[in-house]
Image (tube, rainbow, N blue to C red):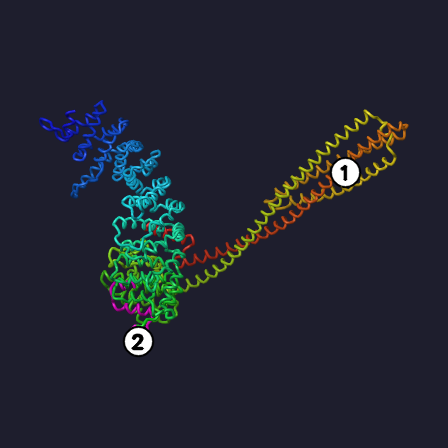
Amino acid sequence: MNFFRGVMGGQATGPQPSGAETIQKLCDRVASSTLLEDRRDAVRALKSLSKKYRMEVGTQAMDNLINILQTDRSDSEILGYALDTLYNIISNDEEEEQDENAQKQADDLGTLFTEKFLQDSENITLLLTLLEEFDFHVRWPGVKLLTALLKTQGVQVQGIILVSPMGVSRLMDLLADSREVIRNDGLLLLQQLTKGNAAIQKIVAFENAFERLLDIITEEGSSDGGIVVEDCLLLLLNLLKNNSSNQNFFKEGSYIQRMKPWFEVGDDNSGWSAQKVTNLHLMLQLVRVMVSPVNSPGATASCQKCMYQCGLLQQLCTILMATGVPADILTETINTVSEVIRGSQVNQDYFASVNAPSNPPRPAIVVLLMSMVNERQPFVLRCAVLYCFQCFLYKNQKGQGEIVATLLPSTIDANSISAGQLLCGGLFSADSLSNWCAAVALAHALQDNLTQKEQLLRVQLATSLGKPPVSLLQQCTNILSQGSKVQTRVGLLMLLCTWISNCPIAVTHFLHNQDNVPFLTAQISENLGEDERLVQGLCALLLGICIFYNDNSLENYTKEKLKQLIEKRIGKENFVEKLGFITKHELYSRAALKPQPVFPSPEQMLFDHEFTRLVKDLEGLITKAVHKSSEEEKKEEEVKKTLEQHDNIITQYKELIREQDTQIQELKEKVTSMTNQTEQLQATISQQQSQIQQHKDQYNILKLKLGKENQSQSNNQGESQVNGLQTEELSQLREELEELRRQQIVLQTQLGEKDALIDSLKSAAQTAEAPAGGSDNSELLQELEALKKQVQTHLAEIGHLKTERQELLSRAESASSDTAPPSDSSSDAAKAELESRLAAQTSEMESLKESRSELEKQLASATSTVAILQTEKSKLQTEVQESKKEQDDLLMLLADQDQKIHSLKQKLKDLGETVEDEDDIDARDQTSDEEDEDED
């Protein structure tokens, strides 16, 4: 023990051993001591030396420390010392400031010892097992050690935990620990665990992570909470960002609704703490993750709808218009509102109705635009406002029309400031950034909207007193020709290209100014410096649009004459080279990545995301149009007209096919209805068979009863009991017998008619071509045939009963004629008993006749229903056959048209034209979407 006292700071005599020697002795003691107390003291000493002698402890003691974790599981104190020691030699966290070289050496040591620890993957499994220990001295250092391992070798550790049974679930239990220090460090552990691993992110999410994290945020005070709220939000961002499965789970779990209270700020927004600003910033980022433009359109639209319905969008707009909100929070709120309304008509309409709390009230859009064109506002705030305006107009033709309407003479209100007035003011101000932002904002009001492009041609501007007004289009070209700053000219050229693209009327208005084409050709043909190359490329694009969308309405500037002008003044190859300057610019690819305008400095704000898409679509088309001859254009026009005609024919046939498909669907529904009716008839027949069986049973019982009575009458009373029958009674019995014979004849006649009807139905079912209902009708006919046989059997049994009664009457008549009458008393008794039995027998016969009559009615009803069903089925089969024949004719016509189109496209290809098939177009669109997603 003197040795340990010396290590731990006690007095010792003689020369002191070096650090490496001391550590070696401690390691020997850990490995060889049999007493737990000795091993514990040695590990505690190693812990105290692990920070100062990190290299020596890590090199010599790691294996011994791991062995302690495996063998001394029963002692929590020694486990805690071992885990702390491993954490000290692996972790790169240093309390004291170090220079760059020292920090690099520490990082290298951490990496080295982490790799050594991970040489055996069972060490991670062992660590996960130790985390199940509730003892604070084991669990807390275990959490810290695993976090340090993840920071250094995250991917490798993630892989081991992922395949470990219940590995992630064990770590999720840390969030439920009642000791806050373990719970909070567990949050840091899960942050490292979920970085960049979608599989682990999904497991954590389905382990009820969202519910637990949102509960912790609420308990800690939401945005007013401390660092724990920040850690929870960072973990939520890890789980949701770029993980569509977790995003859908978050939305379906109604967790979006629980985000609304986060943004409930009071009227007094002064004195926000730095932690509150950080928390609210992360909360806004969490909202943006759910509605990011890089998400699938369906998922984004669903989240946008949910945010509007639960009032989250309204709450964000409240922050947007509030006073005293810190600038960075206001900027991020604007960006968040932008993506919540982007492409959602309902949300865009709501945003258009939001007013700022001013006197008089002004629309929020106007207030935001005032900030955008104000050069004194922060650059990031102006970029955020531009993004918000772009998102408000994205796929919103209604909003585009409202913005353009504020520029038209009939809607201008001199007493109020409108969005159009602010845009025009920014477009022609002295601030180049305001020029660029206003030009891009106005271009978004025209994006993919031919009507507004034509409407904007009506806008007239008053330049100075005494001079006539000029059009907005003309004023843009005037400023362009005056040689302003590059940023201003780039913005105006992007506006003009967006304006006249796919709008022949705007092209005509632009070419009508005699100065525009000479200015563009002069700009393109000059050899200017590096800064002017982008302007040259945009001028080439603008001139190329004038060629491609030219309707040849101006004699001096037809397509052919403009191409001749390019060939003489510029040269086709030089023109194409200048056009390529746009996509080769270093800032072009950055702007093409995502819709949000993010620039390091105002000087680099040159390209707009939507404009890069326009360039991508037009560059190849313009290049082909410039190189194309007039003869090729004429042939192409003819082929296009022919294709349009064929397309119209195909469209007509498609409409006809749709109508026939609708008819076929209706017929299928009728077949289904008839099938249901058939099933109902089968149920009715089954019920009738049951009734017939009951009647048969009753008849058998009656037959047995009559046989027993006849036998008893013959044995006990003999022929003497019949002698008392009176002639009148015998006559009555004969009449009843004759009546039963007549009824039997009538029934046999009716049965013959039904046999003929059933045979005809069977013949019709065998010749029918519709396979769908054939089997069901055949089964129905078979059941009717069986029913008929049962009825015939029933009638035969009744005939047999009548025969027996006839024999009885014959015996009675013979006995009355041959035998002397008995005494009066015995005659009366026999007579009475026979009358009673005959009356009972007659009653049973009447009941049997009624049952038979009811059975005949049911059979007749079923036969009639089957006949009606067969008639309707025959009509339906005829209609289906006619529809199939018409569809076959249409398919033949479509095949013929496809062959003609293929031959025409082949002619175009032979002429040197590029003709894209529908499959090529679909593939190109899909590739473009995938590239956009990858870039985003």
Q: Of the two numbered discs 2 and 1 on the same chain, state the one appearing first in sequence.
A: 2
- Is residue 759 within the magenta segment? no
Q: Which circle marks residue 846 in the picture?
A: 1
Say which amino acid is labelled 2. Answer: Lys
| Displayed quadrant of residue 499 | bottom left
Residue 493 position by quadrant: bottom left
The x, y position of residue 716, in whole percent, is 81, 24
Is 157 above or below relative to 248?
above
Residue type highlighted by circle 1: Glu
User: Which residue carries the number 2 mark?
Assistant: 467
Badge number at residue 115: none
Depth check: give the residue in front, 756 or 370.
370
Q: Residue at x 75, y 38 (%)?
A: 847
Q: Residue furthest left?
A: 14
Residue 731: x and y in percent read: 86, 37
**Residue 479 in magenta?**
yes
| Mark 2 or 1: the one toward you | 1
Vertical placement of 468 versus 110: above or below?
A: below
Q: Which of 418 and 578 is in front in this view?
A: 418
Q: How many labels does the image show?
A: 2
- Do tag 2 and tag 1 residues touch (Cβ < 8 Å)? no
Mark 1 Cα-neighbour bin, 10 Å: few <14, some 14–19, many ≥20: few
Q: Which segment is the magenta one? A: 463-491
**Relative to the observer, which residue lies in front, 208 or 696?**
208
Q: Can residue 592 be seen in this view?
A: no
Q: Is mark 2 on a helix, strand or loop?
A: loop
**SS class, disc 1:** helix
Q: What x and y, as percent, mark residue 890?
A: 53, 55
Give how far across and how far down residue 408 sits, in percent: 37, 69
Residue lying at the far top of the rendered structure: 34
